[in-house]
Amino acid sequence: MGTAQAEGTDDTNALLRLADRGDGDATAALLARCAADPALWREFGDVARQVRQQLVGRIAGDNRVVAMAVWREAGRLRRDWAGDEAPPLERALAERIAACWLHLHLVEGQYQQAVAGLTWAQDEWHRKRVEQAERRYLRAIAALARVRHLRLPAVQVNIGARQVNVAG
Protein backbone atom coordinates (compact mmCIF):
# COMPACT_ATOMS: atom_id res chain seq x y z
CA MET A 1 0.00 0.00 0.00
CA GLY A 2 1.42 3.35 -1.01
CA THR A 3 1.95 6.13 1.53
CA ALA A 4 -0.80 8.32 0.05
CA GLN A 5 -3.26 5.42 0.08
CA ALA A 6 -2.31 4.50 3.65
CA GLU A 7 -2.81 8.12 4.75
CA GLY A 8 -6.20 8.20 3.00
CA THR A 9 -7.21 5.00 4.78
CA ASP A 10 -6.02 6.35 8.14
CA ASP A 11 -7.95 9.58 7.51
CA THR A 12 -11.09 7.64 6.57
CA ASN A 13 -10.74 5.46 9.67
CA ALA A 14 -10.40 8.59 11.82
CA LEU A 15 -13.56 9.99 10.24
CA LEU A 16 -15.37 6.69 10.85
CA ARG A 17 -14.41 6.79 14.53
CA LEU A 18 -15.68 10.37 14.81
CA ALA A 19 -18.91 9.49 12.98
CA ASP A 20 -19.38 6.55 15.38
CA ARG A 21 -19.41 9.11 18.20
CA GLY A 22 -22.08 11.16 16.44
CA ASP A 23 -19.87 13.82 14.84
CA GLY A 24 -22.06 15.37 12.13
CA ASP A 25 -19.12 16.93 10.24
CA ALA A 26 -17.38 13.55 10.04
CA THR A 27 -20.59 11.93 8.80
CA ALA A 28 -20.96 14.63 6.13
CA ALA A 29 -17.33 14.17 5.06
CA LEU A 30 -17.81 10.40 4.77
CA LEU A 31 -21.00 10.84 2.74
CA ALA A 32 -19.12 13.19 0.39
CA ARG A 33 -16.35 10.61 0.00
CA CYS A 34 -18.91 7.91 -0.78
CA ALA A 35 -20.53 10.15 -3.38
CA ALA A 36 -17.13 10.69 -5.00
CA ASP A 37 -16.12 7.01 -4.74
CA PRO A 38 -19.10 4.61 -4.83
CA ALA A 39 -16.75 1.70 -4.03
CA LEU A 40 -16.65 3.07 -0.47
CA TRP A 41 -20.35 2.24 -0.06
CA ARG A 42 -19.51 -1.39 -0.83
CA GLU A 43 -16.55 -1.33 1.54
CA PHE A 44 -18.52 0.23 4.40
CA GLY A 45 -21.44 -2.13 3.77
CA ASP A 46 -19.37 -5.32 3.57
CA VAL A 47 -20.62 -6.75 6.86
CA ALA A 48 -18.93 -10.12 6.31
CA ARG A 49 -15.58 -8.36 6.02
CA GLN A 50 -16.27 -6.31 9.13
CA VAL A 51 -17.07 -9.47 11.10
CA ARG A 52 -13.85 -11.10 9.87
CA GLN A 53 -11.91 -7.98 10.93
CA GLN A 54 -13.46 -8.08 14.39
CA LEU A 55 -12.67 -11.76 14.80
CA VAL A 56 -9.10 -11.26 13.61
CA GLY A 57 -8.75 -8.37 16.07
CA ARG A 58 -9.95 -10.55 18.92
CA ILE A 59 -7.59 -13.36 17.92
CA ALA A 60 -4.52 -11.17 17.40
CA GLY A 61 -5.09 -8.52 20.05
CA ASP A 62 -2.60 -5.68 19.58
CA ASN A 63 -0.13 -7.77 17.55
CA ARG A 64 -0.37 -6.32 14.03
CA VAL A 65 1.87 -9.01 12.51
CA VAL A 66 -0.35 -11.79 13.83
CA ALA A 67 -3.43 -9.85 12.71
CA MET A 68 -2.04 -9.49 9.19
CA ALA A 69 -1.06 -13.17 9.06
CA VAL A 70 -4.46 -14.37 10.27
CA TRP A 71 -6.24 -11.95 7.92
CA ARG A 72 -4.21 -13.21 4.97
CA GLU A 73 -4.77 -16.87 5.88
CA ALA A 74 -8.53 -16.37 6.30
CA GLY A 75 -8.61 -14.61 2.92
CA ARG A 76 -6.62 -17.38 1.25
CA LEU A 77 -8.90 -20.04 2.67
CA ARG A 78 -12.01 -18.07 1.69
CA ARG A 79 -10.75 -17.81 -1.88
CA ASP A 80 -9.87 -21.52 -1.91
CA TRP A 81 -13.32 -22.46 -0.59
CA ALA A 82 -15.10 -20.23 -3.10
CA GLY A 83 -13.02 -21.35 -6.05
CA ASP A 84 -12.38 -19.44 -9.23
CA GLU A 85 -15.35 -17.48 -10.56
CA ALA A 86 -17.74 -18.86 -7.95
CA PRO A 87 -21.39 -17.82 -8.19
CA PRO A 88 -22.56 -15.29 -5.58
CA LEU A 89 -24.19 -17.93 -3.35
CA GLU A 90 -20.96 -19.93 -3.17
CA ARG A 91 -18.96 -16.77 -2.41
CA ALA A 92 -21.42 -15.95 0.40
CA LEU A 93 -21.07 -19.47 1.82
CA ALA A 94 -17.28 -19.25 1.60
CA GLU A 95 -17.52 -15.98 3.56
CA ARG A 96 -19.60 -17.77 6.18
CA ILE A 97 -17.12 -20.63 6.39
CA ALA A 98 -14.28 -18.13 6.88
CA ALA A 99 -16.14 -16.39 9.71
CA CYS A 100 -16.94 -19.72 11.35
CA TRP A 101 -13.32 -20.85 10.94
CA LEU A 102 -12.08 -17.70 12.67
CA HIS A 103 -14.68 -17.99 15.43
CA LEU A 104 -13.86 -21.66 16.04
CA HIS A 105 -10.17 -20.86 16.43
CA LEU A 106 -10.94 -17.87 18.64
CA VAL A 107 -13.00 -19.89 21.12
CA GLU A 108 -10.56 -22.82 20.97
CA GLY A 109 -7.70 -20.44 21.74
CA GLN A 110 -9.61 -18.86 24.61
CA TYR A 111 -10.32 -22.31 26.02
CA GLN A 112 -6.67 -23.36 25.75
CA GLN A 113 -5.49 -20.17 27.47
CA ALA A 114 -7.90 -20.66 30.36
CA VAL A 115 -7.91 -24.46 30.73
CA ALA A 116 -5.36 -24.76 33.56
CA GLY A 117 -7.33 -22.67 36.02
CA LEU A 118 -10.89 -23.73 35.21
CA THR A 119 -13.39 -25.33 37.51
CA TRP A 120 -15.27 -28.33 36.17
CA ALA A 121 -18.31 -26.13 35.35
CA GLN A 122 -16.15 -23.53 33.58
CA ASP A 123 -14.37 -26.26 31.62
CA GLU A 124 -17.72 -27.68 30.55
CA TRP A 125 -18.92 -24.21 29.47
CA HIS A 126 -15.78 -23.67 27.33
CA ARG A 127 -15.99 -27.14 25.77
CA LYS A 128 -19.64 -26.58 24.84
CA ARG A 129 -18.72 -23.25 23.30
CA VAL A 130 -16.01 -24.90 21.20
CA GLU A 131 -18.40 -27.69 20.17
CA GLN A 132 -21.05 -25.15 19.12
CA ALA A 133 -18.50 -23.23 17.07
CA GLU A 134 -17.34 -26.45 15.44
CA ARG A 135 -20.92 -27.44 14.57
CA ARG A 136 -21.52 -24.04 12.96
CA TYR A 137 -18.29 -24.38 10.99
CA LEU A 138 -19.17 -27.87 9.77
CA ARG A 139 -22.75 -26.82 8.88
CA ALA A 140 -21.37 -23.96 6.79
CA ILE A 141 -19.06 -26.38 4.97
CA ALA A 142 -21.95 -28.81 4.43
CA ALA A 143 -24.11 -26.00 3.02
CA LEU A 144 -21.44 -25.15 0.45
CA ALA A 145 -21.08 -28.83 -0.46
CA ARG A 146 -24.88 -29.15 -0.92
CA VAL A 147 -25.03 -26.08 -3.15
CA ARG A 148 -22.18 -27.36 -5.26
CA HIS A 149 -23.79 -30.80 -5.54
CA LEU A 150 -27.08 -29.26 -6.65
CA ARG A 151 -25.48 -27.24 -9.42
CA LEU A 152 -23.66 -30.18 -10.98
CA PRO A 153 -25.35 -31.08 -14.25
CA ALA A 154 -26.60 -34.59 -14.83
CA VAL A 155 -24.99 -36.38 -17.74
CA GLN A 156 -26.78 -38.79 -20.04
CA VAL A 157 -24.71 -41.47 -21.72
CA ASN A 158 -26.07 -43.70 -24.46
CA ILE A 159 -24.37 -47.08 -24.69
CA GLY A 160 -25.85 -49.03 -27.57
CA ALA A 161 -29.58 -49.21 -27.00
CA ARG A 162 -29.23 -48.51 -23.26
CA GLN A 163 -29.47 -45.09 -21.72
CA VAL A 164 -27.46 -44.46 -18.55
CA ASN A 165 -27.98 -41.34 -16.44
CA VAL A 166 -24.98 -40.29 -14.39
CA ALA A 167 -25.24 -37.62 -11.72
CA GLY A 168 -22.47 -35.04 -11.86
Image (cartoon, grey):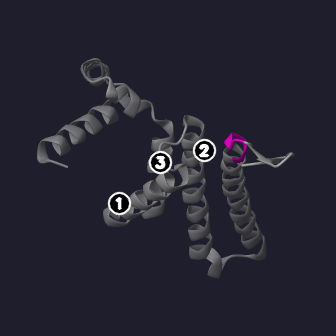
Name the foreground residue: 166 vs 138: 166
Q: Residue at x 54, y 42 (%)?
A: 91
Q: Spatial distance from mark 2 to mark 3, Cα to Cα?
A: 14 Å
Q: Does 10 appear above or below 79?
A: above
**Residue 34 got which mark?**
none
**Residue 84 got which mark?**
3
Mark nearer the N terminus (2 vs 1): 1
**Residue 68 got which mark?**
1
Mark nearer the N terminus (2 vs 3): 3
Badge 1, how many Cα within 10 Å: few under 14, some, many 20+?
Answer: some
Q: Amino acid at mark 3?
A: Asp
Whole-percent x and y of residue 59? Answer: 48, 62
**Residue 9 placement, left or right of 112:** left
**Residue 129 placement, left or right of 9:** right
Write down the region rendered in magenta.
Answer: 149-153
Badge nearest the viewer, 2 or 1? 2
Name the foreground residue: 140 vs 53: 140
Badge 2, how many Cα within 10 Å: few under 14, some, many 20+?
Answer: many
Q: Residue at x 29, y 38 (%)?
A: 13
